[in-house]
Image (cartoon, rainbow, N blue to C red):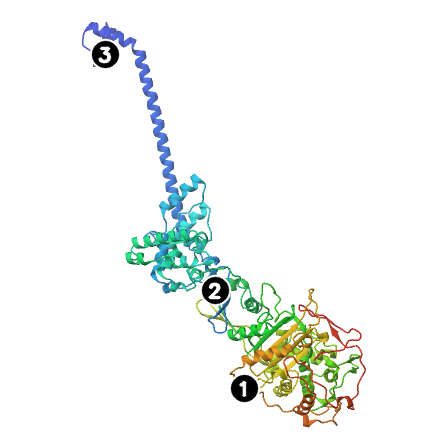
Amino acid sequence: MASQTRSVSSTAGHPDSKGTGSRSRTSGSRSTRSRKPTHQTGKHRSSKHGKGKKKHLLLKWTLGVVGFLIIGFIAAFAYLYATTEIPEPGTTALAQKTTVYYSDGKTPIGSYAEQNREIIDCSTLPKYVGNAIVASENRSFYQDNGLDLKGIGRALFNNVTQGTRQGGSTITQQYAERYYLGETTSYTGKLREALLALKITQTQDKDTILCNYMNTIYLGRGAYGIQAAAENYFGKSAKDLTMPEAAMLAGIIPAPSTWDPAINAKEAEIRFKRVLNIMQEDQYISAKDRSAAKMPTTIAYTQENVYSGPKGYLLNMVRSELVSNKAFTEEELETGGYSIVTTIDKSKQDLMYQVASPSAGDKGLPSGVQVGGISVNPKDGSIISLYAGDDYLKHQLNNVSQATFQVGSTMKSFTLLGAIQDDVSLNTTFNGNSPRTFTSVGKSVANSGLISYGTVNLYSAIAHSVNTVFMDLNQHVTAKKTAEIAHSAGITGKIDDTTTFNALGVDALSTLDLTRGYATIANDGNKTTLHIVNTVDSPKGKELYKATTKAEQVFDSNDVALLQKALTGTIKYGTGKVANSISNTMAGKSGTANDDTAASFVGFTPSVLTTFGIWYPGDDGSAQKVPTFLGYSHGSGYPAYLFSEYMSQALSGVADEQFPTATDNGKVGGPDGTWGYGSGYSSSSQSDGSQSRRQSDSSGSSSSPSASESASPSASASSSSAPTATTSPTPSTTTTSQSTTEPVAPEGATNSSK
């Protein structure tokens, strides 16, 4: 009963209990029978509860990990942001082309460029230029913090799902990449780019960011930055761009090489209209402006090598001068954005090309004949003009500074200066007959054309370039002193100082080197440094380099004045009389190589010196005999003609300048009375060469441009009491336009240098 009572008691609180015994028993019985299922239900509920607890625990852990990651990411981002510093701009971003100008400082010759970029002051640009770029590339530019999160997310999704490499970059991000980092493609690089963009936005104003972006962005046609693009697409400065032109350029930024109007006009116009629509929507332009805007016409563009044609020689010489002087490195010239003003006069340079180039006009020169020409101001060493070749890309050997040829009798001037220094009067007379044998070389030497000049003084001998007189003279002066004087004058090339043949110019020099030596003679014995660069300025206009024009006096001024006086005879009545028609006072000297392999002429006023040389290299570069052309025997006399053609125009309208008055303090017959015919043979009446000139004129020598540079012999030459000699071997040299070789003396040759 107690048990039943417990059973009833156990069910008393059950909602189904009616309070009857039977029911209670039955209930008690059912309760007893249902213990098992009741126990099973409790167990099932306990399992569910356990699983729920596990899920809850997992969720908590998951949220904790995510929270930790978020906090960690935020902390890492904050740390990276705090430690990210804006670096120095990348060298590529700052690289801009260096422009080389003629002497006017305005007309460009060409440029050096790692990238064709010219960084400009954006304050000079119309407002619509920047607005067009903002409309095209980043409409929220003026409001955003440097990042476009939607764009980044979209790009990230496409990169993951499609395997592409897209960017979601704002103008600030692109600027950060191009200006500071260089190209970034990795996710790490993009993160750094984003951080830097945020940092930049906090430290730089929007105008600065946009300006730097416009100066670095690639816009096709080899143009980096808005300035280079304006020049390459429209032939104008960026400050002069019209609104439609700015819109067109802005439109093609994403793919400039593909959307260039010259390549894909349809797509370029679509992009153009898109930019205009956005500019109107964002109120940068009015509806009227939008309606009036028409697709602009671009100029034809040909990617030209700046070194093509004759300008290539100028650019290469400018670069070489600055680098060899250690004023700048190659890299600095290509990236520094400098303005280089040369000494080259544009009009004189054009004149030089027309006169010297075998291809300019129908000159009738034999194919293969090479010409080199240069004109300088001997007072300050500036190069006025030069002809180094027709096309640098086809013929890179510079005919002025690199090609060499046998300079012939132009060397006689240095021997004559040596005689003047040794106190020899130029009225001293010598045996000018041909041929003559000389003990210093053990050979006989002949004058050009085997002409005998009889008794001549040194004025006449230099004017007519008499070989036998100068071989005689150099035996007294000595080969060593002739070489020393030439080098002191500025010639840097090798001159053989062991043979008296060096007075006849048996060594090979360049046109530039020969000009160096004569510039000192033209400048009264004061040596300057020949140069093609005048100044170099920074992009901001600060002068970084200025050529030196300082002169060093290396010879006595009166000695040089006496030499100048003698050299005027070359123009008045000697081998350069083709130039005598020019009214300006001039002096000069001709030269013809042994075996007729080259010819040259140097002439000058006190302010302008011009040199021309011609030679005929074989296929292997060896010196070949110059063919006879246009009446010029093996080219002899042609350089004097080129000189006359150039100087007659270059000196047009230029006031005449006189050389200093010279006093001949030397002794007839030299200091010991043994030079030439000695002290007993004075020829003071010929102190200006007038007698020799009358003799030369009476022989009927031609004064036409094609005349040989050698004058006819005097009427008394054959009957002169001066000794003569039989023909025997004389010196000969083999030179190339590329290198100097040792002189050779083949048997039976006669020297024709003059």
Q: Residue at x 67, y 69 (%)?
A: 737
Question: Label 2 belongs to which residue?
Answer: 337
| Nearest to N terminus: mark 1 or mark 2 | 2
Vertical order, 491 against 338 (above or below): below
Question: Label 1 belongs to which residue?
Answer: 656
Residue 11: numbered disc: 3
Q: Residue at x 33, y 15 (%)?
A: 40
Vertical order, 150 against 599 (above or below): above
Location of residue 601 (image quadrant): bottom right
Vertical order, 256 against 71 (above or below): below
Q: Secondary structure at mark 3?
A: helix
Q: Quadrant of the N terminus?
A: top left
Dots 3 and 1: beta carbons under 8 Å? no
Q: Mark 3 and mark 2: span between their CA atoms?
A: 103 Å
Q: Mark 3 and mark 1: span between their CA atoms?
A: 144 Å
Q: Nearer the viewer, mark 1 or mark 2?
A: 1
Dots 3 and 2: beta carbons under 8 Å? no
What x and y, as percent, mark residue 271? 38, 52
The amino acid pointed to by label 2 is Gly
- Compared across the picture, whether 11 is left or right of 98 comes to left
| Nearest to N terminus: mark 3 or mark 2 | 3
